[in-house]
Image: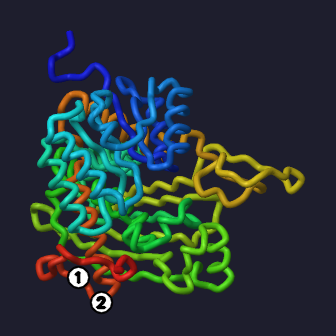
């Protein structure tokens, strides 16, 4: 018998219809007790196409809504997945919070894609609005839910740390040849460049691996941050022009570039006062088979490593095989010939399936997810500390620095 506070099926409304929304549709095919019931996107053709795809995948019945307010107030959705551009996050959350506080609709939870917001002030506002409305909330950081990451952490802490001592160094990097949509390249809309776009993944998966199982991520205290950012590729004249051709004249890296390379080091302390370190690097200037994620976890007598391009499945296509450009082998694919790695289940390997499964079950049962908006705020704080360090050329010590109103130079008006 179903308990009164447990929903038999969580009806999800997707806010946004772009690249990441399609990833979630693929992931939700592997999640039980979930229905994609609604889609809202400002562009009618896009929302209708995504709703049609949800129905085609038998994730519905799903319908496209004419406004976010209509979807939240409809009584047809129980949770909202916020998947729109970063510069719309706060306004989206204001609408959801207001409709829920007015007692309209049936929304009980909200999940938000990375990063939670463009800066710390916005991230705290998103959290405040969710809690003011009494909403359960989950932060959608897919790398934390990667099957390799989950399995690796379990083995390291159970077999290695229990005998030799806790891990003390986590490394994470993510690289590809550049984002899909123009707004990602615009610092004032996205909130930064590659550091904001991709290091949000790296710092959180590293913090997750360093956190003792069963403890909250807040058990680790951020002490300091040091970072360097650079423009390595996309400010070269030939690539400035290529970027304009791909993304439109608004994306002009001769006038207003966002960094395409970032390196960061974070120092943390655990509850016993042990020093822990996170090393991260991210790039939009990597031209290889496709998106490359590398993760390492090191401790006194052990090490763990993950490389998403070290796949079991590879294909070779000779120069006689000519096809149109696409991403059917791996995300951010850069070639259609040669020896190519293939990710046979990107949604699963990258963590989206397990992430959505976890959020659906927590929201359906009224439980607190393992990643919440509080973690989203902590991630943005780490990013702002790294940006501040890169701007000043000095190590930022969190005890001495107020980042509440800080905005990275590339995101300033």
> Mark 2 and 1 residues: CB-CB less than 8 Å, in contact?
yes
Residue 20 x %, y %: 47, 49
Which disc, if any, is residue 396? 1
Is residue 76 left or right of 59 when viewed as pictured? left
Camera-side residue of 234 and 353? 234
Snapshot quadrant of residue 134: top left
Q: Residues within 10 Å of mark 2 (few under 14, many from 20)?
A: few
* Residue that appears at 18% across and 61% down: 124
Q: Taking the image as drawn, is residue 346 in sight?
A: no
Q: Look at mark 2 in the image and give the residue it sits on.
A: 392
Q: Residues within 10 Å of mark 1 (few under 14, many from 20)?
A: many
* Residue that appears at 51% across and 56% down: 307
Residue 165 x %, y %: 22, 57
Label 1: which secondary element:
strand
Residue 392 x %, y %: 30, 90
Label 2: which secondary element:
helix
* Residue that appears at 22% across and 56% down: 126
User: Mark 2 to mark 1: distance in Å?
Assistant: 9 Å
Whether residue 262 is situated above or below residue 132 in the rendered picture: below
Snapshot quadrant of residue 412: bottom left
Whether residue 339 is situated above or below residue 248 in the rendered picture: above
Camera-side residue of 121 and 29? 121
Is residue 385 left or right of 336 when viewed as pictured? left
Q: Quadrant of the C terminus?
A: bottom left
């Amino acid at each position: 018998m179903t308990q009164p506070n447990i929903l038999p099926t969580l009806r999800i409304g997707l806010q946004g219809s772009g690249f990441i929304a399609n990833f979630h549709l693929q992931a939700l095919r592997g999640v039980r007790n979930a229905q994609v019931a609604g889609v809202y996107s400002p562009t009618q053709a896009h929302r209708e196409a995504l709703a049609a795809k949800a129905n085609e995948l038998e994730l519905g019945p799903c319908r496209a809504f004419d406004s976010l307010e209509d979807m939240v107030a409809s009584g047809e959705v129980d949770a909202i997945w916020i998947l729109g551009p970063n510069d719309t996050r706060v306004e989206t959350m204001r609408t959801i919070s207001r409709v829920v506080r007015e007692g309209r609709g049936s929304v009980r939870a909200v999940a938000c894609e990375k990063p939670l917001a463009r800066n710390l002030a916005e991230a705290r506002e998103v959290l405040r609005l969710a809690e003011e409305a009494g909403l359960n909330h989950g932060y959608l950081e897919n790398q934390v839910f990667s099957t390799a990451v989950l399995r690796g952490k379990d083995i390291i802490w159970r077999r290695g740390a229990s005998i030799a001592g806790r891990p003390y160094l986590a490394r994470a990097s993510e690289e590809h040849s550049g984002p899909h949509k123009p707004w990602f390249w615009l610092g004032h809309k996205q909130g930064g460049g590659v550091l904001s776009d991709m290091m949000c993944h790296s710092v959180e998966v590293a913090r997750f691996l360093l956190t003792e199982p069963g403890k909250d991520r807040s058990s680790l205290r951020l002490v300091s941050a040091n970072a360097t950012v650079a423009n390595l590729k996309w400010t070269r004249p030939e690539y400035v022009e290529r970027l304009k051709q791909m993304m439109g004249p608004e994306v002009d890296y001769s006038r207003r570039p966002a960094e395409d390379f970032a390196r960061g080091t974070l120092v943390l302390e655990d509850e016993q006062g042990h020093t822990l370190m996170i090393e991260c690097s991210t790039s939009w200037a990597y031209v290889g088979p496709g998106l490359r994620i590398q993760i390492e976890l090191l401790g006194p007598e052990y090490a763990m490593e993950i490389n998403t391009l070290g796949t079991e499945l590879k294909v070779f296509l000779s120069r006689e095989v000519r096809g149109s450009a696409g991403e059917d082998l791996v995300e951010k694919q850069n070639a259609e010939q040669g020896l190519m790695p293939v990710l046979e289940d990107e949604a699963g390997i990258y963590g989206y399936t397990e992430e959505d499964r976890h959020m659906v079950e927590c929201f359906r049962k009224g439980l607190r997810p393992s990643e919440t908006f509080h973690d989203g705020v902590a991630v943005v704080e780490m990013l702002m500390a790294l940006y501040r360090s890169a701007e000043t050329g000095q190590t930022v010590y969190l005890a001495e620095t107020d980042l509440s109103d800080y905005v990275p130079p590339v995101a300033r008006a």
